Image (cartoon, helix red, strand yellow):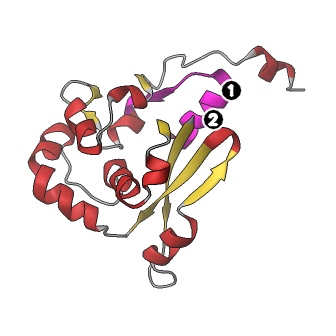
Amino acid sequence: MLIVIWFSVSVNNAENSASEKRADSVYDTVMNGAVLCYSIEGEYPPDLEYLKENYGDIIFSKVLHEPGTIWTLPELLWIKNNNPDIWCKTKKILFAKDYVRHVLTGDYVTDYIEAEGSMLFDINTMNWSEQLCDILGIGTEILPKIAKPTDIAGTIWQFMMNSCP
């Protein structure tokens, strides 16, 4: 199973263009079939214009933001369109902290704060939006369960506890 782990980095475009950075290091393979995906702030992918023209009103009604490079949805669309070999193997999409939780507990969980930043979350229903997921051709089951930031999100596996001093 391939897990896509999502996090953002900033790139100073005066020193290093985002397109060069993306081409060199957008994906790093990590343990157990997971792929780190870097969100490059400041880049303006063509997929962003596509989202604005074709889904701008729908997206705004669900998330109260226009598509932009800081959101996960446009970046995932970029992966889908430019790296279909990675996209077709993806079984879960997690944020970096949620991947750490998964390794420790085996659970796929995120919080409302992180979900809101994905541009796949409907703030009106407080759930993943099937309509926004349809833009990527994914079902909501590929996304983690959503919990409150104060909820217990899992129990650490016994073998993990035993490996700690």
Asked where in the image residue 101 lies, by quadrant, the reply is top right
Q: Is residue 36 left or right of residue 69?
A: right
In magenta, the rendered stretch is 95-112
Rendering coords of residue 92 (x, y %): 48, 34
Q: Mark 2 near mark 1, Cβ–Cβ under 8 Å?
A: yes
Quarter that holds the C terminus:
top right
Residue at label 1? 104
Badge number at residue 67: none
Find the residue positioned furthest to the right: 165
Q: Residue at x 36, y 58 (%)?
A: 78
Q: Main secondary structure of the magenta part?
A: helix
Q: Is residue 102 magenta?
A: yes
Asked which secondary structure carries label 2, the reply is helix
Q: Is residue 112 visible?
A: yes
State the separation of the CA atoms marked 2 and 1: 6 Å
Residue 111 among those drawn in magenta: yes
- Who's the residue at 62% across and 22% down the image? 106
Q: In which quarter of the view is residue 1 placed? A: top right
Which residue is under mark 2?
A: 100
Q: Helix or strand or loop: what does disc 1 sit on?
A: helix
Q: Would you say residue 93 is visible in this rendering?
A: no
Considering only vertical position in the picture, is 141 above or below 120? above
What amino acid type should be assigned to the residue bearing mark 2?
A: Val
Q: Nearer the viewer, residue 60 or 148?
A: 60
Q: Is residue 96 left or right of residue 48?
A: right
